[in-house]
Image: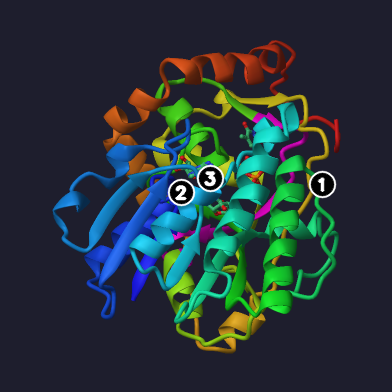
């Protein structure tokens, strides 16, 4: 197998690549990591892998059609695991344009590169539970309608649409996975868990949106990486979708309390701030289809969160390097106004 992993220097890409090479997965002859190294990509995440003869890193844009087509041909790629994306909902609310370019044009460029390619085995498109929108009751199955609420989710749903279209129209062997919120090492500290852990370590405020009762469904990134390999081994039909979830739902407020407990930090670090516009109240995936094929998550949330918190505690140099420079401007832009108007007590729902 000659695999191309896009977004390999980001959170999920890094964990997927590291896990793949460390476990010496049989059948991996080549692993080409393609990443533009945007603000979210960090080449240092891949340190140490250069000595593996199967590994090659290429800095490039997934939306650059010629570059992508040339790379796929030159490396005789037969499997793509497509993780590259603009991923942060709050940034998409400020400006959706980069999300359209990377998430939609980028996915299209990759699909074009493999269309009609002899011997090509699988294009695995890593999508998200956010395409289903907020789930009031029950759990989203793979056939639930797509109702994206944020520009980020809209761009991922549009990309899913192109994957379906290329499977149906050209028979591209493409599958879609939709996972829930991931957590674990190497996550950029703009997302809830690494942001709150690193802020708490520095004695800074933890800005909880709205009433803090929005529910997310947490999946350890190691379980996610294993699930991706499991799906690659399934011989799924072109255009098939698989939800990936450990069925571990939790309100943000309860999660924040667990983080503070693990770090032995006071509850008064929590500040309730103005809500995210269009904030989905609850995500909940039904992973029954994948489970029926034998996949099971292995990491309990208590253990996974404790290990994750310990990782950030021990890797201060990793996140301090990120949380300086342009990150500070981002943080001030996103949070200083909100924190100035924050309160110590929960807000009313949706406020
Ligand atoms: P991330 O933001 O940590 O990493 C994204 C990576 O993509 C970065 O390394 C970045 O440099 C790279 N990238 C961005 N634009 C690029 C471009 N134009 N060309 C090449 N590389 C580019 O994201 P992540 O959390 O690792 O997410 C990976 C995938 O998983 C995304 O498709 C995301 O939508 C999906 N997903 C993530 C989660 C989660 O909880 N993290 C949940 C559901 C789905
Ligand atoms: P996030 O990590 O941005 O992931 P997503 O929006 O893709 O689910 O946010 C997870 C949850 O945490 C979401 O309900 C929004 C909330 N949140 C806060 O309350 N405060 C914050 O500063 C951030 C970044 C998120």
Q: Give the SS element for disc 2.
A: helix
Residue for badge 1: 149
| Label located before the other in sequence (1 or 2) | 2
Residue 45 versus residue 295: which sits nearer the camera?
45
Q: Is residue 213 left or right of residue 122?
A: right
In which quadrant of the rendered image does the C terminus lie?
top right
Q: Label 1: few (<14), some or many (≥20) within 10 Å? A: some
Tell me, for residue 67, which label it has, or none. Answer: 2
Q: Residue at x 77, y 30 (%)?
A: 275
Q: Taking the image as four quarters, which one is ligand 2 found in?
A: top right
Q: Residue at x 65, y 81 (%)?
A: 288
In which quadrant of the rendered image does the N terminus lie?
bottom left
Tell me, for residue 64, which label it has, or none. Answer: 3
Residue 247 versus residue 41: which sits nearer the camera?
41
* Scheme of colours in the image: rainbow
Q: CA distance from mark 3 to mark 2?
A: 5 Å
Q: Is mark 3 within 8 Å of ligand 1?
A: yes
Q: Label 3: few (<14), some or many (≥20) within 10 Å? A: some
Q: Magenta stretch: give its range.
A: 208-224
**Image position, residue 84 (x, y; %):** 51, 50
Q: CA distance from mark 3 to mark 1?
A: 28 Å
């Amino acid at each position: 197998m000659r695999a191309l992993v896009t977004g390999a220097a980001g959170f999920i890409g890094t964990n997927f690549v590291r896990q793949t090479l460390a476990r010496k997965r049989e059948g991996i002859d080549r692993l080409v990591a393609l990443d533009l190294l945007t603000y979210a990509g960090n080449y240092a995440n891949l340190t140490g892998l250069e000595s593996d003869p199967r590994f090659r890193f290429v800095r490039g844009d997934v939306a650059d059609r010629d570059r992508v087509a040339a790379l796929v041909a030159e490396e005789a790629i037969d499997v793509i695991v497509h993780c590259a994306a603009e991923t942060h909902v709050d940034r998409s609310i400020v400006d959706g344009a980069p999300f359209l370019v990377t998430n939609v044009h980028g996915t299209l460029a990759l699909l074009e590169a493999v269309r009609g390619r002899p011997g090509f085995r699988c294009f695995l498109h890593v999508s998200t539970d956010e395409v289903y929108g907020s789930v009031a009751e029950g759990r989203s199955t793979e056939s639930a309608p797509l109702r994206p609420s944020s520009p980020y989710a809209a761009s991922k749903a549009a990309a899913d649409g192109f994957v379906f279209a290329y499977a149906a129209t050209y028979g591209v062997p493409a599958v879609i996975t939709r996972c829930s919120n991931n957590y674990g090492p190497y996550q950029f500290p703009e997302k809830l868990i690494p942001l709150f852990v690193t802020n708490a370590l520095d004695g800074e405020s933890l800005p909880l949106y709205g009433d803090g009762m929005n529910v997310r469904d947490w999946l350890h990134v190691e379980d996610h990486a294993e699930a991706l390999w499991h799906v690659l081994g399934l011989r799924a039909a072109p255009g098939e979708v698989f939800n990936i979830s450990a069925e571990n739902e939790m309100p943000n407020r309860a999660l924040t309390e667990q983080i503070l407990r693990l770090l032995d930090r006071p509850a008064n670090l929590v500040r309730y701030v103005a809500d995210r516009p269009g904030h989905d109240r609850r995500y909940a995936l039904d992973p029954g289809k994948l489970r029926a094929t034998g996949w099971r998550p292995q990491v309990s949330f208590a253990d996974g969160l404790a290990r994750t918190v310990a990782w950030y505690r021990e890797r201060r140099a990793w996140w301090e390097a990120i949380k300086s420079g342009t990150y500070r401007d981002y943080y001030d832009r996103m949070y200083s106004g909100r924190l100035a108007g924050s309160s110590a007590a929960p807000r009313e729902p949706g406020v």
